Image (cartoon, rainbow, N blue to C red):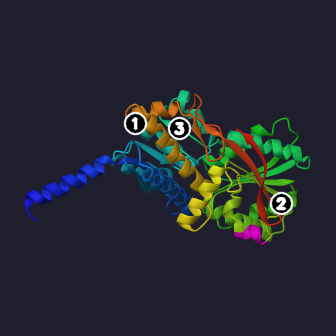
Amino acid sequence: MTIAATMMLFAAHSAVAQDKIVIGLSTPLTGSVAALGQHENWGASLAVEEINDAGGINGRQLHIEAQDNQCNPTQGITSVENLLQNDPIAVMGALCSSVTLAVMPIMERAERPLMVGVATSPLITEHAGVGGNDWTFRINPSDSGLAVALGNYLTEMNTIKTIAFVGEDTDYGRGGHNALTEALKGKGIEIVSADFYKQGTPDFTTVLTRIKAAKPDAVALYATGVDELGFIRQYRGMNIESLLSGRVSLDELLPVIQAGALEGATSVYPYAVQLDTPENKAFVESFKTAYGELPNYQSFQGYESVRVLADALKRSKELTPAGLKQALKEADFASVTGGNIKFDDHNQAHNLALIVKVKDGVIVIETMSGT
């Protein structure tokens, strides 16, 4: 190949690359919650494929660039710094609350929107928008809103008076504890104990022994990934009769549920595949066709995050990070859940809080409320 031909080929490749609109994704692709990060990546990729098949953004194709953050704040900062080298118009992430809080200042300095779709720490909302960081937007409810829905449900049960709290020793676990404590004030329900474990803990025997002896009416669990599965297996293995509740990822525990081990367990979550809307049914079918399994909360939020960004890009007067930020502030986007995504002055959107419950070996939606 001649030098001239080589230069022409390089120029053609460069033109194609420049024609793409890059969206970064910082999510855990290795480590104890890698399965959740993979689902977020799958959901985002599915949305990109659908949008590109429909013509893209004003004729330009979207492209997802994913980086592994290992659910670790230090690695999260590295992942976002690497993503920024590819000039993304926005970054999605970072799934884990502690990582999200760590990368928020990086995105603010880079003046690029950060779209948060999974992390639930109330601190993210407090620090965003009028809280100081005007580049962070969150489409999922915070644990404050979810805790209110859970507190109301447990109160209406009229059988729960004492709760033992167990959560990971992160912004997610500690933020969840604070939010639930606040939500239960004046409701006649007391959190009688709080245990926080380090991520990667293999043995919960000491905590579970105390809980079994104390016999609380319920256990509120705020755990993720393999830690959550390990806790629940040991919990049921010790035949603890307290109601299991909190932020339990029931959609990740279908084999355990089908075996009858979690009958009666409840959880508050922003999404469930059982949502009966045309948009959700279409999403579930598309996801199953693409990946051979049901979507979960993380895949839904990856899918929704890309669609909200794409909607804002189409409305943006200019395809720049600043133009995208302004368009996000004016968002009024129809969610898969049937609600609408609008951001308040803290750049926090408000959508559904679902109480889901295991009944006869299947997950059902008990109540739905706004956050």
Residue type, numbered disc 1: Pro
Rendered-image quadrant of the N terminus: bottom left
Q: In x, y percent, where is residue 160?
A: 88, 49
- Is 213 contained in the magenta span? no
Residue type, numbered disc 3: Phe
Residue 198 position (above or below residue 189): below
Residue 166 position (above or below residue 321): below
- In the image, taking residue 301 as reference, residue 19 lies left or right, namely left
Determine the CA span between mark 2 and mark 1: 46 Å
Determine the CA span between mark 1 and mark 3: 13 Å
Question: Tag 2, which secondary structure?
Answer: loop
Rendered-image quadrant of the C terminus: top right
35 or 233, which lies in front? 35
Q: Do the residues labelled 2 and 1 touch (CB within 8 Å)?
A: no
Q: Name the residue under label 1.
A: 321
| Circle 3 crowding by C-alpha within 10 Å: few under 14, some 14–19, many from 20 | many
Q: Name the residue under label 3.
A: 137
Residue 107 lies in quadrant: top left
Q: Please give the range of residues in magenta.
A: 255-259
- Is 257 contained in the magenta span? yes
127 or 207, which lies in front? 127
| Circle 1 crowding by C-alpha within 10 Å: few under 14, some 14–19, many from 20 | some
Q: Mark 2 points at which residue?
A: 264
